Image: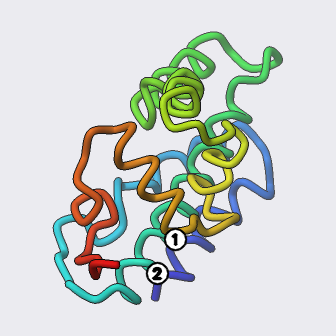
């Protein structure tokens, strides 16, 4: 089921024309299964990875629409949409890296789901963000 949504976004991005890129950016309708609450760590991990994958596809389409060869109005719309996705893009990662003592690249990799954080990393991020670990991780964490 989720593959279809990704494929519908990925195919126009591959074509790469301004029209298909705009089409792909319109297909992103927010977070996958937004509002669904299932207290299962496996499902939550899967859902997080799928949401991140869809967001990356959206960012990829919008980033391509920033090309100087395109009309100013298209570029401005794409830039606004990118900021809507993440208004603190880049700045927040640097600040989080400084406050948590975790390398910015490691934070980027976690955000992109190219690496899984250790429990210690999750703890450091939760402390830096002033969020209790169970709430930050999205599920109950057993005491050590």
**CB within 8 Å, label 2 to label 1:** yes
Q: Quadrant of residue 39?
A: bottom left
In the image, residue 142 sits, relative to residue 14, either above or below, namely below
- In the image, residue 88 lies at what x, y percent? 46, 24
Residue 132 appears at what percent x and percent y? 23, 54
Residue drawn where x is 64% and y is 10% of the image: 72
Q: Secondary structure at mark 1?
A: helix
Q: Taking 131 as reference, is 76 left or right? A: right
In the displayed structure, would residue 42 be above or below residue 72?
Answer: below
Q: Which label is found at residue 49?
A: 1
- Measured from the top left, where is residue 114 in percent x and y? 70, 64
Q: In the shown orientation, is residue 37 left or right of residue 96?
A: left
State whether residue 55 is above or below residue 139: above
Q: Nearer the viewer, residue 121 or 41?
A: 121
Instruction: Say which element carries label 2.
Output: helix
Label 2 belongs to which residue?
46
Q: Residue at x 60, y 43 (%)?
A: 59
> How many neighbours does mark 2 have within 10 angstroms: few (below 14), some (14-19), or many (20 or more)?
few
Which image quadrant for residue 143? bottom left
Q: Is residue 20 visible?
A: no
Whole-angstrom CA distance, mark 2 to mark 1, is 5 Å
Which quadrant holds the C terminus? bottom left
Residue 42 x/y as whole percent:
40, 89
Q: Residue at x 51, y 37 (%)?
A: 100
């Amino acid at each position: 089921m989720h593959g279809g949504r990704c494929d519908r976004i990925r195919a126009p991005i591959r074509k790469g024309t301004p029209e298909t890129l705009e089409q792909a950016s319109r297909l992103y309708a927010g977070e996958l299964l937004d509002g669904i609450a299932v207290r299962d760590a496996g499902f939550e991990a899967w859902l997080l990875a799928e949401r991140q994958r869809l967001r990356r596809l959206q960012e990829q389409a919008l980033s391509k629409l920033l090309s100087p060869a395109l009309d100013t109005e298209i570029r401005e719309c794409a830039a606004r949409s990118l900021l809507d996705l993440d208004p603190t893009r880049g700045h927040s990662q640097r600040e989080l890296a400084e406050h948590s003592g975790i390398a910015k690249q490691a934070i980027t990799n976690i955000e992109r789901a190219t690496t899984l954080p250790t429990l210690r990393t999750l703890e450091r991020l939760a402390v830096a963000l002033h969020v209790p670990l169970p709430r930050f991780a999205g599920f109950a964490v057993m005491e050590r």
